[in-house]
Image: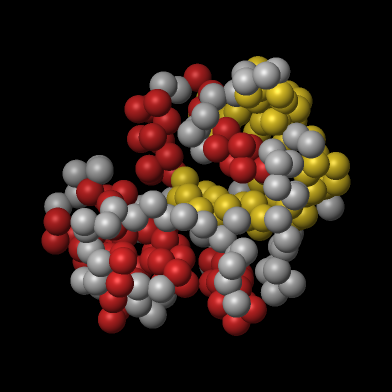
Amino acid sequence: MKEIIRLENVVKMYPGERRVVNDISLKLGEHQRVAIEGPPGSGKSTLMRLIAGMEKPSAGGGFVLDKAVHEMDQDAAAAFRGRHIGVMQRDPGFMEELTVIENVAMPLTTRGVPVFKRNREAKERLKEMGLLSITHASPKQITVFEKTLASAARMLISQPEILMISDIFPGLSDREAGRLAEIINGLGKSGNYTIIVFCTEIPRELELDRHIRMSKGKIQEDL
């Protein structure tokens, strides 16, 4: 299996000499479906940001698609992430002054894709999520679950190789969580993505190739 992500002795220190990520080495293969599970404060969200180049490690290195993301400056990391990594978090951070379709299209907007093409792509992603009826709504006018689905549409719009999904299940009903798990399972079965789900508790419907448990900044189990 082709290696797509590699972490080498990664440490992340926060103020007060607190090790949030503590000497983690990890390899993830292409098209794997992986869950990284841990309680709040286990370091899993920080690990996600380190892999995605949103933060720099205090020590060690992170390599994604053979690129040293820990050596990239903020702009280079954002450009790399925009092309290769789709990120989905519980709070999608939508801009309230933009419509749903404009928010979903934002990764293409920042790359300078013409408005007609990016809106066409955003509409197609929203259609896949069953959200055509809210295309021109404001984020303030839609439900939490609709925002979550729209965030999934935004994650996919750049056709990234890697999907990173962080703590999206808390606060959803069993039916909504099951629907999201079905979507993620479908993406995994497509064979187009490496999928990493960071979560406090893994939904029973989620289909995985690998299950990693974190605690106190360290990997405790890798099944």
Instruction: Name the residue rendered at 85%, 46% in the picture.
Output: 221
Image coordinates of residue 27 in percent, x first then y, are: 70, 38
Q: Is residue 151 above or below residue 28?
A: below
Image coordinates of residue 202 in percent, x first then y, are: 72, 63
Number of numbered discs: 0
Can the viewer see residue 137 in this picture? yes
**129 left or right, relative to 18:** left
Q: Is residue 118 above or below residue 42?
A: below
- Foreground residue among 112 and 92: 92
Q: Is residue 217 above or below residue 148?
A: above
Instruction: Name the residue rendered at 70%, 69% in the picture.
Output: 203
Image coordinates of residue 11 in percent, x first then y, are: 69, 24
- Foreground residue among 6 and 93: 93
Residue 204 occupies quadrant = bottom right
Residue 122 occupies quadrant = bottom left
Residue 215 occupies quadrant = top right
Can the viewer see residue 193 in this picture? no
Image coordinates of residue 158 in percent, x first then y, are: 36, 53
Q: How are the colours assigned in the image?
A: secondary structure
Instruction: Name the residue rendered at 67%, 43% in the picture.
Output: 44
